[in-house]
């Protein structure tokens, strides 16, 4: 299965929640789910009785779409979370948050995770002094994320410098707004992960 390349606002409407896939547009009156708060398609406005399995599936799809991950990789993260000590659901979300593209987004260097993924792939970032062009890389405590010196001169990052002046990263990250340098202070706790996902439903789905 290839990565979804269609209109992302359709995905928010399908899940019945804002997934913030289009960055700043999601905070405006142009947001599709504010204008048409029902599922897309011919039968989108019909009321449907959702089974327990259906609820679990929707939570899994919602999480996949928020982080932009395909099913095979998503399941690998779950298997890894299962093998770690602690609560599987929290471990799972923590792994997803530690992805480099997500950290770039959380620091404010991109307006959406999709944009962050593209910027990482185009070699705009450096992790601990080394080239970092793989969006799925997992950061560790103490890791430092910087922008390549050549990229700092581009109009895109000049714009980012203005935008991050009004944004605050989550408590587990540190941002130097002057130097545009981010640092991982700790792994995120569940209450620091503000995604609209009931991770226990995903655990139950994969435990069937």
Image (spheres, grey):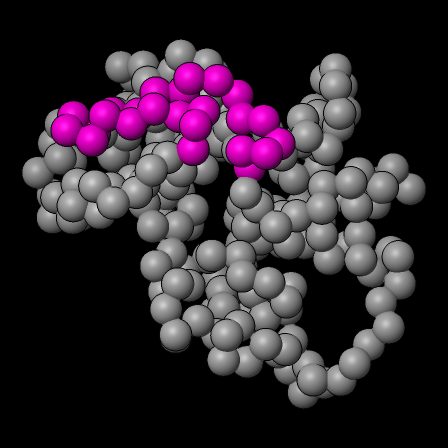
- Tell me if 97 is positioned left or right of 145 in this view: right
Determine the image quadrant of residue 164. Answer: top left
Q: How many marks?
A: 0
110 w.r.t. 17: above or below: above
- Tell me if 178 is positioned left or right of 128 in this view: left
Determine the image quadrant of residue 75. Answer: top right
16 w.r.t. 53: above or below: below
Q: Residue at position x 54%, y 33% from top?
A: 192
Q: Residue furthest left?
A: 153
- Tell me if 73 is positioned left or right of 137 in this view: right
Q: Is residue 52 visible?
A: yes
- Tell me if 41 is positioned left or right of 47 in this view: left
Q: Residue at position x 38%, y 56% from top?
A: 23
Q: Residue at position x 79%, y 46% from top?
A: 201
Determine the image quadrant of residue 200. Answer: top right
Quadrant of the rendering where the N terminus is positioned: bottom right
Q: Residue at position x 49%, y 65% from top?
A: 8
Q: Residue furthest bottom?
A: 42
Q: Over which residues does the magenta segment extend?
A: 170-193
Residue 131: where, in percent of width, then height? 30, 22
């Amino acid at each position: 299965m290839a990565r979804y390349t269609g209109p992302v606002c359709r995905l928010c409407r399908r899940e019945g929640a804002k997934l913030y896939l289009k960055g700043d547009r999601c905070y405006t009156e142009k947001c599709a789910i504010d204008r048409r708060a029902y599922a897309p398609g011919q039968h989108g406005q019909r009321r449907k009785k959702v089974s327990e399995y259906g609820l679990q599936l929707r939570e899994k799809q919602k999480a996949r779409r928020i982080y932009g991950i395909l099913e095979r990789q998503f399941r690998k993260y779950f298997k890894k979370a299962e093998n770690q000590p602690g609560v599987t659901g929290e471990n799972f979300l923590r792994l997803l948050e530690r992805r480099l593209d997500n950290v770039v987004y959380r620091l404010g260097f991109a307006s959406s995770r999709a944009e962050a993924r593209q910027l990482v792939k185009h070699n705009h970032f450096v992790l601990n002094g080394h080239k970092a062009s793989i969006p799925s890389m997992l950061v560790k405590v103490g890791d430092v994320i910087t922008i390549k010196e050549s990229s700092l001169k581009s109009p895109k990052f000049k714009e980012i410098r203005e935008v991050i002046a009004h944004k605050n990263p989550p408590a587990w990250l540190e941002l130097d707004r002057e130097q545009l340098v981010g640092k991982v202070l700790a792994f995120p706790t569940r209450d620091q992960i503000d995604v609209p996902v009931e991770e226990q439903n995903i655990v139950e789905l994969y435990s069937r």
